[in-house]
Amino acid sequence: MDRFENGPLIQKPSSNRDILIMIAIIWMVFSRLFYFILSKLNIDFFTSDLFRFANALFSIVWGIIPLLLVFSVKDKNKQIFLFILAGIYLLMTVVDLFEEFIGAII
């Protein structure tokens, strides 16, 4: 008996893993478009205070993306290893932002 004989194949609803991967890909496209459009507008964005704020926000989200992707891995051993790597990446991002913030104050 053909699975399609009685109508279209019913698909499972999206899993949380699918949603996490979709969030990561949407963020990648959004951030790339954001900087691409700004480069075409010929404004002095990269020396403005808005750039520092946007850069900090983008850095924080980019630091969180690996943590989101860790939860899409099914194997628990690999997930623990990747969670440690993602934590190190996020920590490096936060330290870098903190140094930039302190440098801007001083």
Image (tube, grey):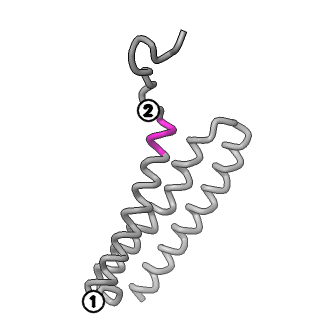
The residue under the point 44% across, 21% down is: 9
Task: Specify which label sits upstream in the sequence, 2 or 1.
Answer: 2
Dot 1 falls on a residue whose secondary structure is loop
Nearer to the camera, 41 or 1: 1
Find out whether residue 50 is within the magenta segment: no
Image coordinates for residue 94, horizontal then vertical, percent: 51, 67
Q: Residue at x 41, y 67 (%)?
A: 58
Please state which amino acid type lies under the numbered disc 2: Ser
Residue 3 versus residue 81: which sits nearer the camera? Answer: 3
- Say which of 39 and 50 sits in front: 39
Q: Locate residue 13, reporting x and y percent.
A: 42, 27
Query: Which percent across, then down, holds residue 39?
Result: 34, 83
- Above or below, 57 against 50 in this view is above
Q: Give the residues in magenta.
A: 16-20
Tell me which corner region of the image, top left, top right, bottom left or bottom right, holds residue 102. Answer: bottom left
Which of the 4 image quarters holds residue 40? bottom left
Q: Nearer the viewer, residue 82 or 34?
A: 34
Tell me the residue at 61%/56% (across/down): 86
Most distant residue in the right direction: 77
Q: Is residue 60 above or below residue 65?
A: below
Residue that badge 2 annotates: 14
Magenta segment, prevailing SS (helix, strand or loop): helix
The crowd level at tag 2 (other Cα within 10 Å; few <14, some 14-19, many 20+) is: few
**Callout 1, which amino acid?**
Asn
Tell me if residue 18 is in the magenta stretch.
Answer: yes
- Residue corresponding to mark 1: 42
In this picture, residue 33 sits left or right of residue 93: left
User: Badge 1, how many Cα within 10 Å: few under 14, some, many 20+?
Assistant: few
